[in-house]
Image (tube, rainbow, N blue to C red):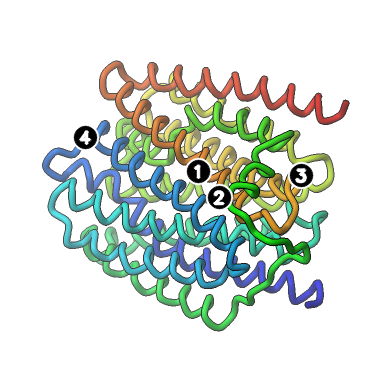
Amino acid sequence: MSEENEFKNVIRLGYVSFFTDFSSEMVLSILPVYILNLPGGSIATLGLIEGIAESLSYILRAVSGIMSDKFRKRKIFILIGYGLSNLAKPFFALSTTVSHVLGIRVLDRVGKGVRTAPRDALISDSVRKDQQGAAFGLHRTLDQLGAIVGPLVATAVMVWLGWTARGVFYLSLVPGTIALFVILFGVKEIIGSETRDFRFLSGLREVLQGQYLKLLIVVSVFSLGAFNYSFILLNAKQMGVNDALVPIVYAVVNVTHTAIAIPAGRLSDKIGKEKVLLLGYIAFTATAALLAVSPLNVPFAYLIAAVFGLYMGVVETVQRAMIPKYVDSSLRGTAYGVYYLVVGSCFFFANSIVGSLWERWGLWASSLYSGGLAVIAVIGLYLFTRKEKL
């Protein structure tokens, strides 16, 4: 396959993510507030739901990544994963309890868990090593464009058409269905040139060693404090943002996320991915600091959202683009799976702890916890980068 056609595969996977995020972020931009209005809904409950759902998603990424290496197939896992997620979200409209939301959120994240590692491996397989940052940056940008459009559409139909949250949940099925057609008719199966007899345990042993293992340790320290967007939206509500305008705060997160993804990816190809990832960790540290010290007014809610988006755009682009540097192509699915397993396990604890700290002692306590771990990770990544040069 020619280089041009290989990059077309990345673009088509980007379109898949665009329409899926269009669908998902319509829902997720209003889901935190929706949960708080249900019987038993609270900040701690939200943290627990997000922790359970996302950690399960990350665990399944390890399984699907390993299986895609074993069977030398990526597309079937991608199709099943996106299918589950896009069919699950409209069922939020039928939920009346927190347990209903948890079940649907888990099914949605199961879909993400099945698709993500094989998709990232397929992106990596589709381009040369010196194009990894650019490829993941392009994919991330298209993904986040959908994440911008989704909250804006949710706000438009709620404010101008008078729709309720349940109507938005049903509407999410439309862009999600388009994504499935792009996978079926646009995405091509590509497997890296390096082949070997796949053995589960030997593959894990080969991946979990050397510099890749050290990198995972640094990433895990950071991830233990890295809360997700839900807390940014709840902070915006507490700062005075109207419920119907909370999706706009989420759109701000996604605008800065989108704006930084391609530049971060290209810069990482030029100066080194570790250096650019360090900037992402620093952006998260700044977010935690702003949460702790900002006055309670609406402009600061949007400022915090913008800085958080910069962190997400850098980290979610560059961390994934780094992995091919440390493993060969025959084990990329396994490496991505292990990466997501580690990050997801930490994610569960991070969101649960941050939610509990916020509920019990306030925002300053959760910010101190997350910011402290981020500082440790910044130091660890700096030392890791220095040793890489030696």
Mark with earlier residue (1, 4): 4
Question: Which numbered tag is attached to residue 341?
Answer: 1
| Residue at 69 percent of width and 46 percent of height | 323
Mark with earlier residue (2, 4): 4
Q: Quadrant of residue 316?
A: top right
Q: Is residue 191 left or right of residue 92?
A: right
Tag 3 secondary structure? helix
Query: What residue did someone put label 4 on?
Result: 42
Query: What residue did someone put label 3 on?
Result: 268
| Residue at 52 percent of width and 80 percent of height | 184
Mark with earlier residue (2, 3): 3
Q: How far apart are marks 2 and 4 (CA)?
A: 32 Å
Q: In this view, does 390 lie to the left or right of 199?
A: right
Q: Do the residues labelled 2 and 1 touch (CB within 8 Å)?
A: yes
Query: What residue did someone put label 2 on?
Result: 337
Look at label 2 and name its amino acid.
Gly
